[in-house]
Structure formats: C-alpha cells, structure tokens
Image: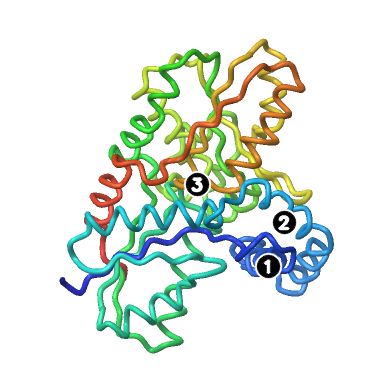
Amino acid sequence: MSNHALLLVNLGSPASTEVADVRRYLNQFLMDPYVVDLPWPLRRLLVSLILIKRPAASAHAYASIWWEDGSPLVVLSKRLQAAMKAQWTHGPVELAMRYGEPSINTVLQRLAAQGIKQVTLAPLYPQFADSTTTTVIEEAKRAVRAGNLDMRFSLLAPFYDQPEYIDALVESAKPYLEQDFDHLLLSFHGLPERHLRKLDPSKHCLKGPDCCQTAPPQVLATCYRAQCMRSAAAFAERMGLRPEQWSVSFQSRLGRDKWIEPYTESRLEELAGQGVKKLLVMCPAFVADCIETLEEIGDRGLEQFVAAGGESLQLVPCLNDHPRWVAALKTLSERAPLML
C-alpha cells in the first residue's frame, strides 16, 4: 500500500438524539464563523439564544429519523468509505466529520502516525460555499499547523458540473423518474444572500432574475446559487426532462435574514396549488441522506404538500453509496490538484 490517503469529509451529526448531545453539536456548528458569519460577540449571543429551545426541537427531529445503528448521515458515510476502500489503491481511506466525531484533527493525527504525508482532502459537497468547502479546508490547515504535521493536500474541488457527478445523479434517480410523476423539485440547501454577495466583488450576484445563467467564470467559481442552478440544469438535460417538468428551490432557512430563493416551503405550496399531485423531490446538494432530506423533506415536506392539496411526495434518495457515485468519486479524487 502506498502512502497517499483519501480523507472523505462530511458535515457531521450529534453523537445521539439526547438533547445535551444535540446542543453540543449545534453549538460547534453554529459557532463556526464560516456558518454564522458575524463578529464573535454577536455570534455568541445569537447562538446562545438559539440554544435555548432549538436543541430540544432538533433532538425530536433527529429521533424521528435515527437508525438502529446511528445517525443516517454517519452510517451512510461509513458505507461510502467502505466502498471507496475497494476502489482507492493509493493508500488508506478515512472518514471525518467537520462537526462531531470523528474530527478532522483526530483523523489527520492518526494518518500522520502511520507515516502518511500525502492526503487527498475530499469535502463531500458538490457545490462551493464558505460554510461547507472553505471551513473543511481551513480546519484541515489548522490541524496541520497545530500538530506540526508533515503533510501535503490535494483538494477535491466542487464538482457540481462534472460529468461523473451528473451521471451518478442520473443513474441513482432513474428508477424513480421512470415511475409516474407530475413534477420534480430539486431542493438544494439554502444560504443567506449575504454569503453570496461577500464573495462577489463584481456585484453580479442577485442583481437580476437571470444572474445565475449569465454569471462570468470568476463569479461562478464561488457562487453557490449559480452552481446549484448549473447542477439542476445539467441533470434535467441528461434525464431528458422538459422545462415544465422540473424546478429548483432552497431549503433549511435559519433566522430572519434573507436567504436565497425560491424557498422550498413556498414552492411546495405553489406546486400543490397548481394541481401537482405526484411530486418527486431530489436534494442534490447532499451526497448522503440526513436530517435535511429524511425529516425536513421526507416527513415535514410530505405533510405540508399533502395539506396543501397534493397526494404524494416521494423523496429520491441521495447518492449515498450507489456504485456509480463510488466510481465517480474515485475518478474525481484521483484527478484532484495539489493545494498550494
């Protein structure tokens, strides 16, 4: 075995559905300055207020989708890791979580102890955002500095438009889209609009209804919304969907700030009001099913859609450990460039 490791990194999960564990997880997540991008005193105040009631509500939500062997996100990520071990011939394949355990620091320390000096860092996020990709990179750098580790990284860049990723989406979703349905909603995780604007010195973002379609390369490189739109359009084209058969929305709003639109909650109401009865929902910003897909869409989204007049909402599973996704991830990771 060579000494080039692959480190898969996903968001993370509470250790259990106990309120104390959920509170600990939410505190770590929300206190990340790349997630809540406020000055520390304001961030601490806001998060402290959120942690008064949110952990109990979130613990209830986690409990409703928790599997016998643990958090769905963690279990599915471990299955992907196991599948990748059979594909990655360059060294060990490890799994870390940005929040919770196993931490990026713990895993890098373990790899260093094995004499590993080259790591392909693979944030499992198709589209770029500071709150996903950047925070993983910075945490890996911090761990290397803190531990004085002799380690170099290759980076799996956002792969929102890569043919291997789109092909994997198509193959995993095809059995569901071959069934009878009225509409497909591609629901991506949302972000506050300010997250987009602060990364766009050209001031192009959110200036018009077609800003994502006309984004120049320097804007597209860091514009989460534009990348989501490109993923959705590429998927729809590969599936041969007509424009009226699909649409895009953004879920998981938190707080009072303006988030990117259209909102998934509003779109569910609109589609039901337009006569859509059989709705499919995909969540292409996630590569593993988690609370945002299983509970937010599969449970609450279904309830909302039916209450608004719809008949059925079918959640299309994420890529998880689908064989086409495993093959795509191997290819994408092997061509990841060396970080400066």
Which residue occupies 59% across, 55% down? 198
Q: Amino acid at mark 1?
A: Asp
Q: CA distance from mark 1 to mark 2?
A: 9 Å
Which mark lies nearer to you, 1 or 3? 1
Per the rendering, the mark at residue 259 is none
Which residue occupies 30% across, 47% down? 326
x, y percent for residue 70: 55, 57
Q: Looking at the image, which residue sits at the far top?
A: 275
Q: Secondary structure at mark 1?
A: helix
Q: Amino acid at mark 3?
A: Cys
Query: Which residue is disc 3 drawn over?
Result: 223
x, y percent for residue 23: 72, 66
Which mark lies nearer to you, 2 or 3? 2
Which residue occupies 33% across, 62% down? 155
Q: Secondary structure at mark 3?
A: loop
Q: Quadrant of the N terminus?
A: bottom left
x, y percent for residue 209: 59, 29
In terms of depth relative to the viewer, which is nearer, 91 or 196?
91
Which residue occupies 47% across, 47% down? 288
Query: Which residue is disc 2 drawn over?
Result: 59
Looking at the image, residue 25 sits to the left or right of residue 111; the answer is right
